Image: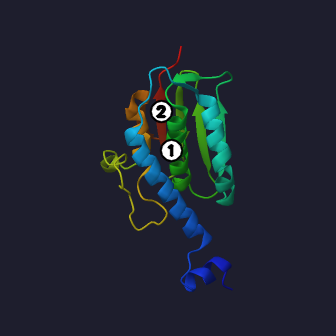
Amino acid sequence: MVCEDERLRMNGQPSAHDVEGMCRIVGQLIDSVESDTYIVAPSEKAELRSVCIEVVELVAPLVISQGKEICLDAAPEPVWVKGNPDLMYRAVRNLVENAIHHTPRGTLVELVVRSDGSIRVFDQGPGIDDNEREFLFRRFWRHDRRQPGSAGLGLAIVRRVADARMASITVENRDTGGASFSLRFQRAA
């Protein structure tokens, strides 16, 4: 039996999955260019928990449709940090989408917001090869160029946001498998 998406693909028309992937790439291209021109005012601040809640609400349907889970563990009180809320949202969204992409079916993506102004995104994927760490945040770099649905822009956007005087970023492999990406923002007064 041939599913509807396969019939469309065989007829030369893109599937819904293809269109979704193209929209994501176009959105990332726009985010990438905009992040180069954004100037963050020293007085700007954002509530980090709210930003992360918005991201989780956005990606939850995708996570469920892929047979995965997502968990948000947030500090009990608001976490005000210095920076632009739109840029933060883009950075967190790209980290979470990257984790979803690298997490196998039936596993969990965790997003942790701490009161010190940091967030951590944990996945249960293959982890990061030491030889690839220096390339991770370069535009258009991908571990596997044959894999569809990625242009290699997500982590480059995260780096640009961090470089806009908003945050520091670290990457580690987890002892239990997978990777951990951390963004640490400066606390707002």
Location of residue 46 (image quadrant): top right
Which of these two is toward me, 16 or 113? 16
Location of residue 72 (image quadrant): top right
Residue situated furthest top in the rendering: 189
Q: Is residue 176 visible?
A: no
Which residue type does callout 1 highlight? Leu
Q: x, y (%) of residue 99?
A: 53, 49
Which of these two is toward me, 118 or 156? 156
Q: Are marks 2 and 1 in contact (CB under 8 Å)?
A: yes
Q: x, y (%) of residue 147?
A: 45, 66
In the image, is residue 171 above or below residue 74? Answer: below
Q: Is residue 128 visible?
A: yes
Which of these two is toward me, 20 or 108? 20
Q: Earlier in the sequence, mark 2 or mark 1?
A: 1
Secondary element type, mark 2 = strand
Which label is found at residue 183? 2
Which of these two is toward me, 51 or 135? 51
Q: Is residue 137 left or right of residue 80?
A: left
Residue at point 65%, 53% (across, down): 63
Q: Which residue matches tag 1?
A: 95
Question: Which image quadrant: the N terminus?
Answer: bottom right
Q: x, y (%) of residue 68?
A: 65, 54
Residue at point 61%, 70% (across, down): 16
